[in-house]
Amino acid sequence: MEAARGQDRGYIRQGRGLPSVADQVAALKHAGVVERCVYTDRMPAVGQQVARRKPSDLTKREAVLADLRRGARLVVATLRVIGLSEQDIGAVVWQVLAAGCSIYAADRDLTIDAETGREIVKAEVAAAAKALMRLRPEDARRALAKLVDEGAVKVGRRPAVDALPPEMREAARQDWLNNRALSREQVAEKYGMSAGALKNAFGNRLMPRRRRERSTK
């Protein structure tokens, strides 16, 4: 763990809607990033140059991404620092994950890594983009909470279906995969969860994930 932390890189961006550079420096230092591993894009917060700002202007961001090594963290004060729009933020997040690294946002004690569900990543990116535009990020997080409550999103490694007793879980699996008399929605209603949760647990409707195992019996 200490070796991985030694590879961590910090990124700071100056701009509208972002914490001050001093606050970002303090957040990165508190997260354990050493000063020589911090990259800073200093950009005007006001004026005509803001309208012309584009991702290619973030030269230090490109440098820190190139400097990341597998297993390291990209540490930021807040997720909205890493991009100029929802598309831009998302592109950076997926680039970091594809490199075998993770992102840590200090303001929310949030880590996004390979184990983070895709829908959760999308919701966090959307929330960061809304916050960047001085809108309320709660809308995106409320939508995420609704998905979690419905079982449509797996949190960590525990899908909602795992909360069922073993015998009921097996019955749900059989109904989902083999019971043609019930629709997707009817199976979901029967077990009190969403169709998405059942799909996450058992695979596509009437297409078992363990097809190969069944064929060898």
Image (cartoon, helix red, strand yellow):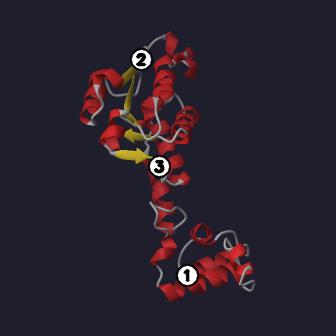
* Residue at figure coordinates x 56%, y 69% from the top left: 197
- Pick the front one: 203 or 53: 203
Quarter of the rendering containing residue 209: bottom right
Q: Residues within 10 Å of mark 2 (few under 14, many from 20)?
A: few
Mark 2 or mark 3, earlier in chain: 2
- Local secondary structure at mark 3: helix
Q: Do the numbered discs 2 and 3 sit on residues whose CB atoms are within 8 Å? A: no
Residue 40 vertical position relative to residue 126 in the rendered view, above or below? above
* Residue at figure coordinates x 56%, y 22% from the top left: 55
Left or right of 60, for residue 23: left
* Residue at figure coordinates x 52%, y 61% from the top left: 153
**Mark 1 or mark 3, whichever is nearer to me:** 1
- CA gap, disc 2 and disc 3: 26 Å
Q: Do the numbered discs 1 and 2 sit on residues whose CB atoms are within 8 Å? A: no
Mark 1 or mark 2, earlier in chain: 2
Q: Mark 2 points at which residue?
A: 45
Tell me if residue 7 can be seen: yes
Mark 1 or mark 3, earlier in chain: 3
**The C terminus lies in quadrant:** bottom right
Q: What residue type is labelled 3?
A: Asp
Q: Mark 3 points at which residue?
A: 139
* Residue at figure coordinates x 48%, y 75% from the top left: 162
Q: Mark 1 points at which residue?
A: 191
Q: Which mark is residue 148?
A: none
Left or right of 9, for residue 59: right
Q: Residue furthest bottom?
A: 167
**The N terminus lies in quadrant:** top left
